[in-house]
Amino acid sequence: MDAVNPATGERLNVYDLDDDDAVERKLDRATSTFEDWREVPLRKREQLLVNAGEVLRENKQRYAELMTREMGKPITQAVAEVEKCAWACDHYAEYAHKYLSEEHHPSPPGTEVKTVHDPLGPVLAVMPWNYPFWQVIRFAAPYLTAGNVGLLKHASNVPGCALALEEVFAEAGYPDGAFQTLMVGSSNVDGILADDRVRAATLTGSGPAGRAVAETAGKHLKKTVLELGGSDPFIVLDDADLDAALETGVQARTLNGGQSCIAAKRFIVHTDVYDEYVDRLVAAFEGLTVGDPMSDETDVGPQADPGLMAELHDQVQASVDAGATLLTGGEPLDRTGAFYPPTVLTDVPSGCPADTEETFGPVATVYEVADAEEAIAVANDTRFGLGASLWTADRERGQRLARDISAGCVYINEMTKSDPRVPFGGIKDAGYGRELSEMGIKEFVNKKTVWVE
């Protein structure tokens, strides 16, 4: 398993894969550890999570630089990602016992009826490269604190991050086997998930990968949570604060090089402000600094892999060939590394890749609409349903329109984002289930009814 710097093409390290015997040992270790870990008092598990947050903060620069080297995230954003991970640890350390407290129900006189929350066992997590620390912590913090143990199958281009995350929990004092990294390829996932020792799975990734995991889990009647990406709308209505909608829109499309499931991908702009917004969006994109991700001055780093950049460019080129208008960008930069410029497409024909597919890079597709009703129709005209951002000066209007948007979350006058305090997840081809908040920690517990006479 190779780690290659996408900014330079330099091979960083080569990691040995786990053979069948090593995987077997890790599954056995997870099973035996779970039997003891589930009995550890919840308050003790919360304290260990506090420790994990401290480990993250103490090592945030080292972990951030590791992320930046392996997948090209600008260093300032990588530092922020580690800090967000520590925040998630803090949140569940404070609230896990409240989220998992016994729920008492109406019952006949002289009886007690309650629901308790028991852990399920080893949980397999198949995680992506784009937020290599955050995606893992947002499953591990709640699931481990609920009494489960974790088995991480990380993306093959961030093996150093995968091992560093194992280090975080070890240094925090978690028992051996509570969180393990499986150094395996994607072809191993099906067999590991089918193993009786694995009780549930969570995946963030592509639609095909999610369907494969769901199919195997379904055959074996195992719970899954899937987050499969999106083509999120960013709706700018006629009464929107254009300055705020522009500043946030640029960030929402180019953060992490545009490689985010909840990035603003389809800009849906009211005709009264369309020309001004597009002109300013193009100017803002052209003013961004694309370059060395280790520099604090860089806004947009490389794409995570040359092959991924080529796929993005193919989508852009096919859309232009179909009739879309290219206003800026649209060609890989002539330099070492997988650098793709911030790109704006307008007049996008229905059915072309930029219209129907998830563009995983700094490519903004802009639509002109006549009114709010058309904006909602365009926003919903997608097979995805992860997040949406809607901009209007009338908060009541925004809340009314939000009810008609088919998405797992709608942010009014704010960019779509994940937050440990609120549920996160999608509908339609964006997946199912919820992460974070109280809903997230309860996804992988047995909600057991106890009736006492």
Image: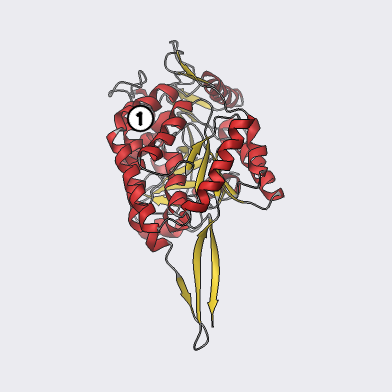
Q: Position of residue 152 (x, y in %)?
A: 52, 38
Q: Nearer the viewer, residue 8 or 245?
A: 8
Quarter of the figure with residue 318: top right
Q: Is residue 169 above or below residue 398?
A: above
Q: Quadrant of the N terminus?
A: top right
Q: Nearer the viewer, residue 173 or 278?
A: 173
17 vs 283, left or right, is right
Quarter of the figure with residue 351: top right
Q: Nearer the viewer, residue 243 or 230?
A: 230
Q: Residue 276, can we see it?
A: no
Q: Nearer the viewer, residue 430 or 373?
A: 430
**Picture residue at 53% right of the left edge, 54% below the top:** 444
170 vs 449, left or right, is left
**Picture residue at 36% right of the left edge, 54% below the top:** 44
448 vs 70, left or right, is right
**Residue receiving disc 1:** 63
What is the three-letter code of the residue carrying label 1? Tyr
Quarter of the figure with residue 29: top right
Q: Position of residue 412 (x, y in %)?
A: 38, 51
Instruction: Tell how many labels.
Output: 1
Q: Position of residue 206 (x, y in %)?
A: 58, 36
**Picture residue at 64% right of the left edge, 33% below the top:** 188
Q: Is residue 159 above or below residue 56?
A: above
Q: Quadrant of the C terminus?
A: bottom right
